[in-house]
Amino acid sequence: MRVLLLTGKGGVGKTTMALATALAAAERGHRCAVISTDAAHSLGDALGHPVGPRPVEIAPRVTAQEVSALAELDRSWSEIHAWLQAALFDSDSLAAEELLVFPGLEELVALRAVHEVEAAGQHDVCVVDCAPTGSTLRMLRLPDVLRHLMENLWQWERRTARVLRPVAERLGAGRFVAPESVFDAFERLYAEVESVRQILLDEDRTSARLVVNPARVVIDETRRSFAYLCLYGVATDAVLVNRLLPESAAQGYFARWADRERAELADIEKSFPVPKLFAPLRPSEVRGVEALAELGREVYGARDPAELFVRRRPVRLAKRNGATLLEIDMPSAHADEVDVWIRGHDLYVSVRDFERRFALPGSVGGLPIADTRWRDGVLEVQFAQRAEGERSP
């Protein structure tokens, strides 16, 4: 099943573009599901009729669903949450509810709906109306955090808890040591998160499409988002430029706006090395299936929206002159925004406010960094070669 993640700065028109994309794909014969994982759902607003947590048909071969993040979270997190609340708080409170949810967890468990759509086998394409960029990026960071915990600390913590639990119960402090059921629940949660992660990082079927307006603030954030998505291994295959001022309106008061937009479009063209698709500002609000379908036809033209427009793995290992390199596409980042370092057998890469840990394969694990280079928008990290006869750890 093809998965399209539409994201971007809040207010740029992600929901409109998600629905237009799904309706245009359906006209090509695809069976499409549109799901919203944004806590502030607006699929129903754009369609002009209610859409709830269960899929509803909105057009031939198209269903829409506003995933209830709280219900999905309760399904995955309730047992862990109950123990944490009992251990850390004396009473049920709003503060406890807010503090006991990892940043990004709500969006990530909501994306489990993608896995369920695929398992049902009734759709060829799933278009995800994601939360605004910040929430989407927090969602992408969480699997790495959980994986680090599971790989390095989990079994030790579970064994320690088994030893401490009887002692803690005799001392009246049993609530501070997690029961086995909580460990089991966390392992189930991790398995669910990992299944979602596998979908997100499958470049053969999943790609992001960034929705942008021709405005400086929006473009700057979208450029950073493009780099962050690459850092976390999510391929972007198109940028959808929404609400372009039509030439017929570029006169009088709006002439200066049109000049500014032309300058911003030139910047968009050189900032994103993927196809750009354009949607003009409409004379009225785009609302309802007919208006959204018309917009989809105008944006995609002869293209099939379900097509993978660019096929490239953003993070990859390569060999050059006998040396191993880790290559990360970051065409919209700047070299002075990036930092790279080794800690133990892991490589860390940070881009501005975001950092990712890469668990290195045994062939390069433990090797120092020989060189880092910025080449045509690609960060290249070259590892030192092992001495002759030296074995991998």
Image (cartoon, rainbow, N blue to C red):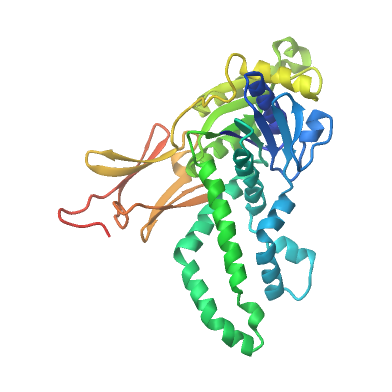
Identify the residue at the far front of this view. 121
Residue at screen point 66% across, 60% down: 77
Q: Is residue 386 left or right of residue 307?
A: left
Does 363 appear above or below 26?
Answer: below
Of residue 317 and residue 133, the one placed in the foreground of this image is 317
Residue at screen point 63% across, 89% down: 171
Q: Position of residue 95 (x, y in %)?
A: 76, 65
Query: How many numbered marks, from 0 up?
Result: 0
Q: Is residue 254 left or right of residue 26?
A: right
**Within the image, what quadrant is residue 19 found in?**
top right
Q: Name the quarter where the C terminus is drawn.
A: bottom left
Identify the residue at the far top of this view. 248
**Residue 271 visible in the snapshot:** yes
Q: Name the quarter where the N terminus is drawn.
A: top right
Does 202 appear above or below 91?
Answer: above
Identify the residue at the far right of this view. 49
Q: Is residue 203 left or right of residue 220?
A: left
Of residue 120 and residue 188, the one placed in the foreground of this image is 120
Of residue 216 and residue 231, the one placed in the foreground of this image is 231
Identify the residue at the far left of this view. 388
**Residue 261 visible in the snapshot:** no
Q: Position of residue 259 (x, y in %)?
A: 66, 17
**Within the image, what quadrant is residue 81 found in?**
bottom right
Q: Position of residue 218 (x, y in %)?
A: 65, 33
Q: Position of residue 227 (x, y in %)?
A: 51, 39
Residue at screen point 74% across, 47% down: 68
